[in-house]
Amino acid sequence: MAQVNPRHVDAVMELINRSPYFELLGIRLTALSEGACTVEAVLERKHLNAFGGAHGGAYASLLDCAAYWALYCSLDEDEGFTTVDLNASNLRASGPGLVVVEGRVVKRGRTMCLCEAELRDAEGRLLAHATSKMLVGAHLQPMSAAVRELGAGALPPKFLA
């Protein structure tokens, strides 16, 4: 596969970071590369359950975002993809503060891919882990749909010539 264009990666990260769901939850895509990504969030009161701990749904959202975006650079320019399932294990409770989620591609298939993500607190303690299957196809959420939906201009080419 050709080398991913760093200008494209920067433009995609800027675009995705201003998407409605990322803005709602305060999620930031901070690194994106072939087979991997990093997502961060500062957990606040809005992320907590009634008992003062991080809500499992907040963990699941972060894990899903990291697993999902880890696959992006591994796909051809015209391919889209969507999450088929997310199997999350919450391993440790946390409260407010920075969390970092590392996503990676485990197996890249032609139409089905397996990804995983690990969510850690600022001290590096593992809080949650997830695996996710992704379905790949030309008409499944291609980047052109995000560009159109968010009113962005044309992105730089995904791959260097």
Image (cartoon, grey):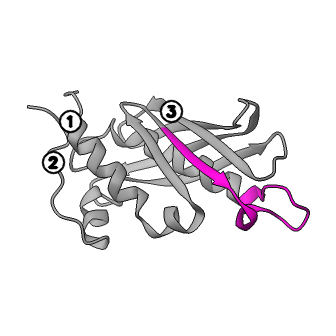
Disc 1 residue type (three-letter) = Asn
Q: Residue at x 40, y 63 (%)?
A: 18
Q: CA distance from mark 2 to mark 1?
A: 8 Å
What SS does tag 3 mark?
strand
Disc 3 residue type (three-letter) = Arg
Q: Residue at x 71, y 60 (%)?
A: 44
Q: Nearer the viewer, mark 3 or mark 1?
A: 1
What SS does tag 2 mark?
loop
Q: Is residue 127 left or right of residue 23?
A: right
Please tell me whether residue 64 is drawn above or below residue 110 in the rendered image: below
Circle 2 residue: 156
Disc 3 crowd rating (10 Å Cα; few below 14, some 14-19, many 20+) is many
| Quarter of the picture holding the N terminus | top left
The picture quadrant where one finds residue 77 is: top left
Q: Which labelled disc corresponds to residue 47?
A: none
Between residues 75 and 26, which one lies in front from this camera angle?
A: 26
What SS does tag 1 mark?
loop
Marks 2/1 in contact by CB < 8 Å: the verdict is: yes
Circle 1 residue: 5
Q: Position of residue 25 (x, y in %)?
A: 59, 63
| Quarter of the picture holding the C terminus | top left
Q: Which residues are magenta?
A: 38-57
Q: Position of residue 135 (x, y in %)?
A: 43, 49
Q: Is residue 45 left or right of residue 155?
A: right
Residue 54 belongs to magenta span: yes
Circle 3 residue: 104
Residue 49 belongs to magenta span: yes
**Any part of residue 132 in sight:** yes
